[in-house]
Image: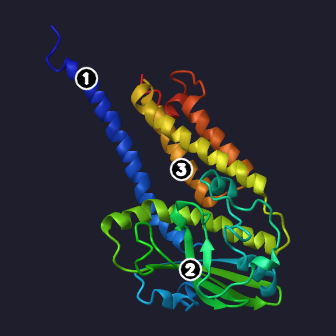
Amino acid sequence: MAPASQPDRPRAGTLARLAALLAVLAALGLVFGLLIRPWYLAWGSTASDRTVALPGDAIIPNATAQETRAITIHAPVDSVWPWVAQLGQDRGGFYSYDLLENLVGCQMPTVDVLRPDKQWWALGDKLWMYPSTKAGGAGYATLRVLVPGHAMAFGTHAAGTPLTAPEDGSWAFALQHVNDSTTRLLVRGRGAAGRSLLGVAFDRSIFEPMHFVMEKRMMTGIKQLSEGQDRGRMANHVQVVLWFLTFAMFIAGVESVFRRAAWRRALTGTAAAAIVFQILTFGQPNYDVGILLALIVATVLWWPVKPGSALDGMLGGKRAA
């Protein structure tokens, strides 16, 4: 007669897999919180950039959250300003991943050209990030500070804050003259106190990283266009496709942890997919590097490996049979 504990073995196996998966995800979350988040909050900036007063700081005078990012552009200020001045869904776009933006209905311009008639601002004008005819006309920020040829800053509402409530955030763009052929672009976001714990959790886990991914590409796009380069929109499209593929491999890996006999190999592939996804979105390497990394993840997850081989042991399959 089988021992009384025999029927519990499949359940114990599932619990072991779940515990291992949660441990891997917790480790990745810890790395994200301790290393990746501080890096992207200050991407490209110096200590001086992060402490210098910028136009727009007074929109949220007692900010409890601030992020400052910067990029050096090898072009004079008056060559950079027109590209900054026409930011907006109804102007020149945001020079970011417009494929992704348009997939969610942003209707961004798909041609990168200077539009002189779209570079004029007055205090109170709206910076549209989503079409004014959609989402109840809520997809905008309001111009509160304007220093023509140098800076503009907008008041914003955090997710969940009613449009009728006071603005609880700011988004500022400032150009610093380095020399006649070099400019520093600083982009600063500030947030007010009063966010709920749920709001803070949403900001840190979803809004902040998504905003950084798009903002970093926007700043890089401004640099490329100001320097007379092509922004590489098709390469951007390939990168977005790689994001979706890598995220899909992560989901497939999680499912395989509970379905496959060689679950440790599936767990290794899941961790690899999560790491590569962060590299592709935050690091934004060239698409050829992204393709290589995605192929490595696919290999870890699905490439046939002879049982008992050294590679099988490396991938965790040796102990899983």
- How many labels, in total? 3
Q: Residue 115, located in which quarter of the rendered image? A: bottom right
Identify the secondary structure beneath mark 3: helix
Figure quadrant of residue 112: bottom right
Q: Say which mark, if any, is on residue 142.
A: 2
* Percent position of residue 309, x then y: 55, 25
Type of the residue with mark 3: Ile
Q: Residue furthest top?
A: 1
* Relative to 184, residue 283 above or below: above
First in sequence: mark 3 or mark 1? Answer: 1
The residue wearing badge 1 is 9
Q: Quadrant of the C terminus?
A: top left
Residue 65 horizontal side relative to residue 142, left or right: left
Q: Viewer-nearest of labels 2 and 3? A: 2
Say what amino acid the circle numbered 1 marks: Arg
Residue 288 in the image, given as x and y percentages of width and height:
74, 48
- Percent across and percent down for residue 318 are 46, 27
Is any atom of residue 96 visible in this view? yes
Q: Amino acid at mark 2?
A: Thr
Which residue has dot 3 on it? 275
How far apart are the two marked residues, 3 and 1, measured between alpha carbons?
Answer: 32 Å
Which residue appears at 31% of the width and 67% of the height? Answer: 197
In front: mark 1 or mark 2? 2
Is the C-beta separation of discs 3 and 1 under 8 Å? no
Disc 3 crowd rating (10 Å Cα; few below 14, some 14-19, many 20+) is some
Q: State left or right for residue 75 relative to residue 186.
A: right
